[in-house]
Amino acid sequence: MSTTKSISSGFLAAFAFCAAMTCLSAQAPAARTAAPPSPVCSAEQYRVQVKLQQTPDVYVALGRCFLKVGRPQDALDPLQRAVQLGPGMANSHMLLADALGRLNRNKEAGAEWQAALKIEPGSKQALDGLARSLMAQGDFEKVVTLLATVNRDESLNIDLSLAYRRMGQLDDEEHVLREALKADPSSDRLTAALVSHWIDTSHFEAATELSEKIAKQKPNDLEAQRILFRTLVVTGENDRAMTLGKRLLEAQPHDEDLLNLNGFLEYKAGDLDAARKHLEEAVGLKPDDYNPRVNLGLVIAQSEDPAGAEQQLRIAISLGADSPQVYFALSKALRAQGKMAEAQQELAIFQQKQKAEADHATAVLKATQAAESLKAGDKQKAADLYREACEAAPDDAGLAYRLAMVLADLGDAAGERAALDASIKANPKFALAQYQLGYLDFRAGDSAAAEQHFRATVEAMPDNAQAWLSLAATLATQQRIPEAREAVANALKVDPNNAGALDLSRKLGEVQ
């Protein structure tokens, strides 16, 4: 009885503390310093409560409070204690993973998401968190392996489509989004993702048609209207965009995204005063977003204030702005101030990025055309187009791998191997290419080379049973039975019912 009462009072303290912290964080700085917080707001007081009640639930409540008010560093200690006291609580692992992810400690976050999945297999929240952690580390192939065959919800479909996009597999991205939208045609997020895909692949008519469709279906849904608004801005339908943008801004006058887009349209129309007003408000609302800063820099430059424009553009670049136009605008602002050497440096960066952007656009176009040729059954044309895409983007491992697969279908073994070599040269952790090279080497009787590639595969995808099984088979052909048994054991840890692994394990036992 006393334990139940103690835990209950701890929860009350946690929720009171959380509410107080949320309230204080929302106040203006002057309001927060005008008077000391009431006793219930005291973090120290709550920590005293925690010391008296060493239960994982209380630590979880405190960690959640810190996350709610945007203090992930402070959330780490209580959530780590919650995991230590209750390692079998999936929620503790997921909250700790969330805190680590917010601190960009993505590898550690991934381990916590995986721990949660072992407790709750199939948890969509944990799958989504793990996928995002893997993508933050650049392990897009692992995301595909993780999500391709599971029952996906909206978030997991977005994750999988984004992984395909980052790998350059744009037709797979489109397929995932199309199928997901068939199941959930009113989803704003899925619609926005497919519209973005079509814009990036220059299918502007399809993007506009889909945007208009959801906006018509959901006239009172801000996000549905926002999709159409953004599409009109990107496709250059400025008159329609401005009409819609003003209407949306009247309904949501302090929406940072709407302020930014309206400001951009006003800049394009030459209404610099209105543009500056809206963009300055957008920057004030979200100072870490580089988009309104870029647009504000362009407006200020037009207002004959090159120093002010330089300041905004440099901040935007420090926040992640990377488009060629930003560097070109900065070069102009520097030149207007007589800083000729600096202006020339920025101009050189502009030229490099402009070429890279043009090459990327060419690669995307050729890859899209290659995918369409494959659908039409013309594999030779697809191979030629993939070659052109690879020439435009030689560091894209995904494109080289897709070329290799087409060449394999055409029976061009030498071309397939060359493309696979190019793929792992671009990205040694590209597991699909490593696995295929291992398969080719194993088939050719080169077990040592096959082992090297299969080991690289299981390092990149430790949760892939087939990769472990292939490594085991390769080791077995070299009569390295103990190592082969260990690899099979790893395959069975991942998939206890894997028929091939069970059969090989039995045979290895007989051999030993």
Image (cartoon, rainbow, N blue to C red):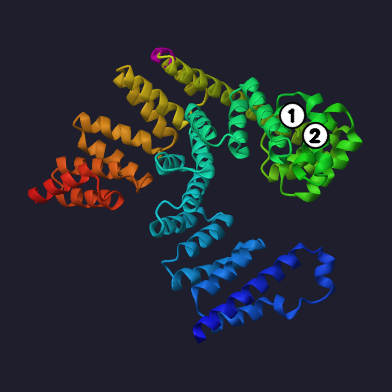
Visible residue check, residue 339: no
Is the residue 343 above or below the residue 493 in the image?
above
Q: Quadrant of residue 373?
A: top left
Which residue is depicted at the point 70% across and 78% down?
A: 40
Q: Quadrant of residue 60?
A: bottom right
Q: Is residue 308 left or right of residue 49?
A: right
Visible residue check, residue 416: yes
Residue 100: percent from left, percent from top: 54, 59
Q: Amino acid at mark 1?
A: Val
Is the residue 235 above or below the residue 126 in the image?
above
Q: Earlier in the sequence, mark 1 or mark 2?
A: 1
The residue range painted magenta reads 378-382
| Labelled pair 1, 2 in contact (Cβ < 8 Å) | yes
User: Considering depth in this image, is 368 or 122 the residue closer to the camera?
Assistant: 122
Residue named by callout 1:
233
Which residue is depicted at the point 60% across and 82% down?
A: 48
Residue named by callout 2:
245
Q: CA distance from mark 1 to mark 2?
A: 9 Å
Dot 2 alpha-carbon crowd within 10 angstroms: few under 14, some 14 to 19, many 20 or more: many
